[in-house]
Image (cartoon, rainbow, N blue to C red):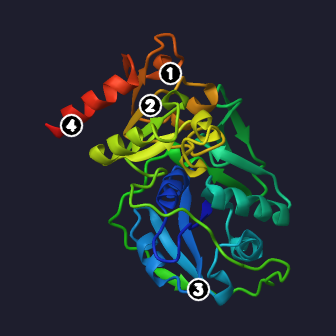
Amino acid sequence: MSKILVIAEHDGKKLNQATARCVTCARQIPGGAVTVAVFAADPAAVAAQAAQLAGVQEVVTVAAAHNANALAAVLAPQVVALAADYSHVLAASTAFGKDLLPRVAALLGVPQISDAMSVEGAHKFKRPTYAGNAIVTLEAPADRKLVATVRSASFEAAAGGGSAPVRAVTLAAAVPSHTRFVSISAATSDRPDLASAPKVVSGGRALASKENFDLIFKLAEKMGAAVGASRAAVDAGYAPNELQVGQTGKIIAPELYVAIGISGAIQHLTGIKDAKTIVAINKDAEAPIFEVADLGLVGDLFQIIPELEKALAK
């Protein structure tokens, strides 16, 4: 029987939806019993949310002052200590998971599987490579602990309705002194979160200026959507880098993705391949984005966006 430890990602108050998607992956591992681990200064609120996820058998909490901020160097030794009784250690393939799990794998002396996008067996997974142009199947040794990050865009979030027991544990793992929390600088916005929003409107280089990119913000606001941007738009300074969608930005899976003035470079398509419906607006009828779009509109975005806004107003 597989015993799977999912490391919760949170901000101290709210569980990140990526963890719920990671739980779905864990549930698909044959014979798996899923435990969610919450590391925090005060884990009660997050643990209660994790306990409600369908398929979670248990939630374990590690409360300590040094866990107030999610520092990978601080958490990794604790994860290793907690993982002693588990066959699998999983975390979402977010900045948090990509920072933490390689350290965990190194301390355990095992290889890591990154960006698992489907479960093929207890130790076998598929993952994308070459910017999503190819899918490879990887199988880890069955006699070792498996460490893997999960491509959350490839899995639906686990539903609620669960009632897993919560158990507090104390770990003897040494806390490193060479790393300490100093401060955090993060963008704040009233708009929906790009990583988890069901609707996303993205703009590309064709907007031609930061001022014109405001058209994307206004349209997204009318649609109740999050805002994204292509790397070209970010590199040109039209949009902040936290809005970048693609291989080197955020990988998302919204119900609706509207790409405006985005040509569709493979690096961008990698970030949206799991979107349910893709709508493309571009004046170039030969743009690669139309090859993946479910709906395409060829035309001048500066004429089309005002028409869309009028239609939404009705």
Q: Distance between the residues labelled 4 and 3?
A: 45 Å
Q: Which amino acid does label 3 sit on?
A: Ala
The residue at which mark 4 appears reads as: 312
The foreground one among 87 and 183 is: 183
Looking at the image, tell me whether mark 4 or mark 3 is earlier in sequence order. 3
The reply, left or right, for residue 251 in relation to residue 97 is: left
Looking at the image, tell me whether mark 1 or mark 2 is earlier in sequence order. 2
Observer-side mark, 3 or 1, equals: 1
The residue at which mark 2 appears reads as: 259
Q: Do the residues labelled 4 and 3 touch (CB within 8 Å)?
A: no
Q: In which quarter of the image is the C terminus?
A: top left
Q: Are marks 1 and 2 in contact (CB under 8 Å)?
A: yes
The residue at which mark 3 appears reads as: 41
Q: Position of residue 31 (x, y in %)?
A: 55, 55
The reply, left or right, for residue 108 in relation to residue 60 is: right
Please rate how many residues cluster around mark 2, counting C-alpha atoms within 10 Å: few if below 14, some from 14 to 19, many from 20: many
Compared to residue 151, the image places residue 302 above or below, namely above
Residue 308 image-quadrant placement: top left
Q: Which amino acid does label 4 sit on?
A: Leu
Residue 289, label in figure: 1
Q: Residue at 61% x, 55% y: name it.
A: 94
Please rate how many residues cluster around mark 3, counting C-alpha atoms within 10 Å: few if below 14, some from 14 to 19, many from 20: some
